[in-house]
Amino acid sequence: MPASHRPDFAAFRQEHAVDRHEHGSKLKDHFMWPIVNQEDLSGPKLMLLLLNARGRLIPPAFAAVDYEGLWFGKATKGLHPEFLHHHTVIMHGATNAEEYGKLIHWDSHPDAEEWVRNRKQFLPGDALLVLEVQERLMKFLVDCCHQILHKIPPDTMISEEYPIQPEPTLKTDSDASGFVSLAVITAEAPYKRPAGLDFSHLLKVLEARTLAAEDHIWSLREDPAYFSEQFREILDHREEMLPDTKGNPHPVTQPHRINTLWSRVLLNMVLNAYSNLEVFSVLYNQVLVCIQLEKSSRNDIDPAKDLPKLYFHALALFKFYLDQAVMVPLEQLEHSEFASPPIRKFFARMPPPDPYTSDMNVIPRAGLKITGVDKEIMFLIQTLWKDDWGLFIARLPLVVDELERLMQADPKADALISAYVAKILGDIAIIAQCLKQLELYQPWAAQFDQVIQSKIDTYRDIWNELVPNFGQLYDAFLKKEFDEVARFAEPSDGKFTYPYSKRRTKETVDTMRRAEANLDIIWTKIDQITQKNVTDFKETALYTLLSRPRTLRRTPEWVEPIKTDSKAESITNRDLWELNKPLSRLFLDEPAQEPKKFKPEVKSKTKVKTKRDPTEPATAEQATPPADEAEPAAEATQPTFAVDAKALKVFRTLFFDPEVTSTPGLIPWNDFLYAMAATGFKIEKLYGSVWQFTPTKLDVERGIHFHEPHPMGKIPFETARRHGRRLTRAYGWHGGMFILKEKS
């Protein structure tokens, strides 16, 4: 038995492709039974899950799953199915041993050939591989049972003396911390009974990610400190920051060309933020469409039959959207990973032929050999964005799973991933999980790619209509007249200094107001350029976000305080009585608004609006973006949470008031999880640094994403403050809602 997890992946890297192609793999078993390995089965759960699933369901239930498990071996030529023409083997839908594995000649049944072409049934060679997998796996499991129950004779074991027992319960899906973990769910899935397509989970994850994209855009516009931090982070991951092979800096880092670099960084920031919002909005909307059609077709869904046409094409369109959407974070990864601070020591940049070119040629640094875990990380990341063929044969979910497993298993691997790259990997992982869910929807999932290819031009037109081309901003941002804005956006001269944690004085208030005003100037110019250059701007999710009656919190002018002994207006509400401005000046048709009390937005349940003819499969109806559900609600009465001292300390930092609380410190990530759980949030670790928080005790259902601090396991105060602002926007929370629980 192979020692390591995913022995097929290890075998692929161990053998030469030519030898495997011409002579067959010498490690065929590794490709045939990838789930049978010592690392996985010697753990506390997986062997038990495998015994339970295979012992309680008949082999046809696993035909599609076992065939999917062979994909990697077939794609890499590690497995060579035999070929028998004009025959079909029945696997799907078989209910007894006589039907299962039955060989049918195409002349003996009118649909036999069509079943193979549409991948509803199996080619003989593929069927033989599946049967071989199942036969040997079942023998292995039966032998294990005989050895575990060695005091019971085999014949007696299956007699009435030992009747079938009710299915036992085993806590699954959670990691050592007790929280639900997507990595654990993925690791356990091949060993459990085949799961169905969980639309509700996908909807929650995609909604939270879409809202996180909105929050990111909002924070870039509202918070000077956040804007400054993001600018520096993107700059740190630009390939211009790599020295070339001669040790020289890039020409655009020279003082007389530096504005070109600032323009690129600003463009990078804007394109990433806007593109993420658009693609995740499209994915979220399409899941809504699929859920509606699944509900209306529920009585017609039968594994032995075709799916209802509208529902099937909505699923195929969702698969196409996912394939297109993942290119956005993959491109972000391509242009940031090798320049990221933990990894740039391994790479150098070729000297540019033109000092102003944005084309970079990054190569491994001469004389520096990459070995061990460094090599593993490089291989997986390059497979994601550089090796299209490698990604095709491995499939995105497998590569993401391997990368996540390596980062969790080896701290050295985790240290090679910067916080910025971890966020990008989190987006890739969310899309990979959606693809993984679609793969589970057997037997129909096998037909999606075939349908997509037959309608590829139509599907591309729909995608291009839904997702705006923000690349149109490229030329506008790099024109000379934009240099002044780009120079103004560069934060090194303190123009965005934002002393939020300091006690309010005239000096601190003036500094904060100056930083906010500087930020408003930049976004006013960016919005003007975006409106002018992006085709159909009013049809974008960005336009919908900017045009909503939502406001930025701004610091009011300093007023000398009236001396009083009363502290009645403390952290409860005072921090919400701040000056507000529109999210974008594009929609400001009147003078500056008067100061008004901040009203949190409370989201209603999602409603769907139709924009296209739902009878056309290729133009499935589109749903309302998740945050475009309701006008900002009137101020609602918020609950009071009685929490212990540990949780209260967290919330006082999240909703920090310098007039009430002393200078805040860092929040340990586990303390943040503890505090959120104390207020009724269901917590799930997704991939990368992304965690999903879903409320269970509030009057809203929308979840929220937060990123685990990386590589340090503590949340800095500035980040904690932004978390607090996001909780205010999402749920209307403020510091006065949290009180110390009385000791019983």
Image (cartoon, rainbow, N blue to C red):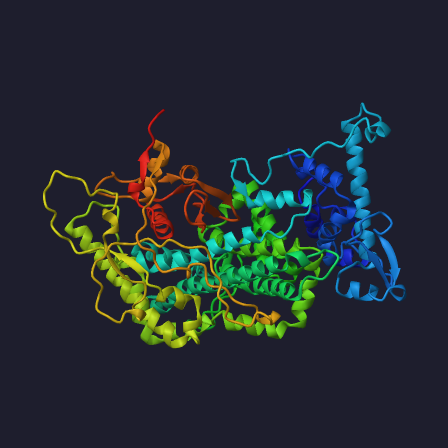
**Apparent side of residue 233 relative to residue 574 in the rendered image (left or right):** right
Q: Residue at x 28, y 64 (%)?
A: 520
Outermost residue, top direction?
151
Height in image: 573 above or below 285? above
Residue 406: x, y in percent? 58, 45
Residue 90: x, y in percent? 82, 56
Name the image quarter holding residue 53: top right
Pick the residue in front: 604 or 196: 604
Name the image quarter holding residue 272: bottom left
Q: Residue at x 48, y 69 (%)?
A: 359
Q: Residue at x 49, y 59 (%)?
A: 348
Pick the residue in front: 523 or 117: 117
Q: Quadrant of the N terminus?
A: top right
Residue 480: x, y in percent? 34, 75
**Apparent side of residue 477 relative to residue 139 in the rendered image (left or right):** left
**Apparent side of residue 27 relative to residue 560 in the rendered image (left or right):** right
Pick the residue in front: 372 or 563: 563
Q: Residue at x 23, y 43 (%)?
A: 658
**Apparent side of residue 738 relative to residue 446 in the rendered image (left or right):** left
